[in-house]
Amino acid sequence: MSTALPAWLPDRAALLGELSTAAAVGATLYVFDGSLPYAAGVAVAFFALRLLTDLAEAAVGDYADHALFGVLVLAATGYLAVLTPPSWLLAVGGVVGGWFLLDGVQHLRHGVARDEVGIKYSHEGSILTGLPKALLVRLAEPFLL
């Protein structure tokens, strides 16, 4: 009997890495909050989310995780709208979720993988000028594809 995981699942090393990251998230929440059931629930949800994004990438393609994350952020923002939060919070959720969704859809639509991104993310200059330029280029990338 083969011990290998199916090809659509992440390999064991990646799976253990995701599990340890989820455990670190849960441990951090336990330290700050002190509630073990809450920390364990968040760790399990975080692990499930990371596994779901890995499965989406394997099934659909690179940047499918961005599209999935954008949909989840927009859904959470829509749910938050029912609770009547400040309007700036809804605006931030809409912009962030919309950008992730647009980024994922554009990269999937044009078939651009992470390895073939044609835009340089580094620019000449100091940290005061180079870093903002690289950030702006990355934020504008879905619109430039």
Image: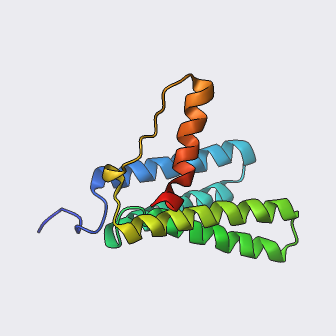
Image quadrant containing the C terminus? bottom left
> Does 88 sit left or right of 38 as displayed?
right
How are the colours assigned in the image?
rainbow
Front-lying residue, 128 or 67: 128
Residue farthest to the left? 1
Q: Image height check: is 52 above or below 38?
A: below
Q: Position of residue 106 (x, y in %)?
A: 46, 67
* Residue 70 lies in quadrant: bottom right
Q: Name the one closer to the observer, 135 or 7.
A: 135
Out of 118 and 39, give the one closest to the viewer.
Answer: 118
| Residue displayed at 53% across by 24% down | 125
Number of callouts: 0
Viewport quadrant of the N terminus: bottom left
Location of residue 27 by image quarter: top right
Residue positioned 30% across, 49% down in the render: 13
The percent position of residue 76, horizontal first and vertical second, equals 69, 70
* Residue 22 at x, y percent in the picture: 51, 52
Q: Residue pushed farthest top?
A: 126
101 sits left or right of 85 in the view:
left
The spot of residue 36 in percent (x, y) is 66, 54
Task: Say whether residue 133 is visible.
Answer: yes
Q: What's the residue at 28%, 69% (across, down)?
A: 8
Quarter occupied by residue 86: bottom right
Q: Residue at x 58, y 25 (%)?
A: 127
Residue placed furthest toward the front: 144
